[in-house]
Amino acid sequence: MKSCLIVDDSRVIRKVARQIFESIGFSCEEAENGEAALTQCRTALPDFILLDWQMPVMDGMAFIQALRKEPNGEKPLVVFCTNETDIAHITQALDAGANEYIMKPFDSDIIRGKLELLDLIAS
Amino acid sequence: MSPEDFDLFAHMVKQRSGLVLTRDKAYFLESRLLTVMRKYNMKSLEDIADNVRNNRDENLMRDITDATTTNETMFFRDRKLFLEFQKDILPKILTARAGKKHLRIWSAACSSGQEAYSLAMMLNEEKAALDGWKIDIIGTDIAKDMVTRATNGTYTQFEVQRGLPVRMLVKYFTQPAVDKWQIKDDIKKMVQFREGNLLQDFGPIGVFDAIFCRNVLTYLDVQTRTHLLGALTSVLATDGYLLLGRSETAGGFERLKPLNVDNGFYSIDNHAPAVAHARA
């Protein structure tokens, strides 16, 4: 079973995302900011990380920059899932090592589509 | 809707687009006709039926037909098919056309253009191999508003997130407004869109190296399907490829042989007996 870490300061978003990922067959963990996510990643690296950008304590950009410097930190596939919907932000995320990008609002089809693109589920 | 009105609409739509509407689709038809009703300021579905019956208003009949056709599409729909086309079929076509350096692809029933633009982006990724080539990608659709949308090449945030890798989004699109993504001109100029009814004479459309006609046959009855396969085959190069939808087959049509049934790839069987296929 693939593992997913959902990083978002909104409890509602985490709940909705968890429902979608569990329905696809992922096991899910949650974190409400980048720092909590980094702590969890140091214990066990997930296969996939769904990452919000704007969060208190540590935002998504600071998190991915720190994650990619960790031992095996290049392994998890990271998809930003954010209200930042302009090309400049998308480019910045890709340059920082994001594998894909979701502009909120999202639905099950969009998440499934991104997982297909990353070969995490069959198309 | 009365059974008589349903039959009137179903018969008209079948004649014009080939789409088969059975009685269990009455709810679908009613929901689609509501848009038409509003556009023409009519008060009921009966008003539309009466107008069709008595006036045979061409614009109205056309709008009804357009409203019933399915426009579901997305960028790189059935990604596996695109990957296999790029890896297995495209190199064969490029080898076969190396002398002419001219590649022609038809996106038949192109809806709002995502398939045709996906092909253009895919070919652009092969730019090095296609240096000096003339590339024609033609997209046709029966619905005028779909052709307009496709020609504009403007998509919503939701549409560009379905099937399109984000690296392609930033490479091939501009963002003129928050929820508006515009395909770039260098991709746009690789594609031409025009109105076209697959059940009527295609006109001077030329011969194609590959025809994408996906998720069309599934809406047609056997007779119309056979007719359409014959018509498509008549404009497919003898060494060209027809690509159907994943759930569709050309089973029973002898002039086409499957290359990969899972993905709906077909080529012309040049050993099969030639059959004349009259066009509607």
Image: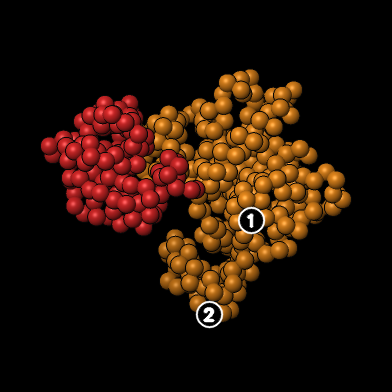
Q: Nearer the viewer, residue B174 or B101?
A: B101
Q: Residues within 10 Å of mark 2 (few under 14, many from 20)?
A: few
Q: Is residue B120 left or right of residue A41?
A: right
Callout 2: residue from which chain? B
**Residue A31: percent from left, percent from top:** 20, 45
Q: Nearer the viewer, residue B247 or B21?
A: B247
Amino acid beneath label 2: Ser
Which residue lies at the image location 77% right of the left edge and 44% below the top edge?
B268
Report the quarter where the C terminus of chain B lies: bottom right
Count of numbered marks: 2
Q: Please identify, in this view, whether the residue under mark 2 or under mark 1 is nearer the observer.
A: 1
- Secondary structure beneath label 2: loop
The answer to whether any part of residue A50 appears in the image is no
Task: Tell which circle, 2 or 1, labels the residue nearer the N-terminal end.
Answer: 2
Q: Is residue B200 left or right of residue A40?
A: right
- Secondary structure beneath label 1: loop
Measure the C-alpha gap from mark 2 to mark 1: 33 Å
**Residue A53: percent from left, percent from top:** 23, 38
Task: Name the mark on residue B248.
Answer: 1
The answer to whether any part of residue B165 appears in the image is yes
Give the color of chain B as drawn: orange
**Residue B276: percent from left, percent from top:** 84, 52
Q: Nearer the viewer, residue A108 or B46?
A: A108
Callout 1: residue from which chain? B
Residue under numbered circle 2: B2
Chain coloured red in this rendering: A
Which residue lies at the image location 52% right of the left edge and 43% below the top edge?
B79
The quarter holding residue A45 reads top left
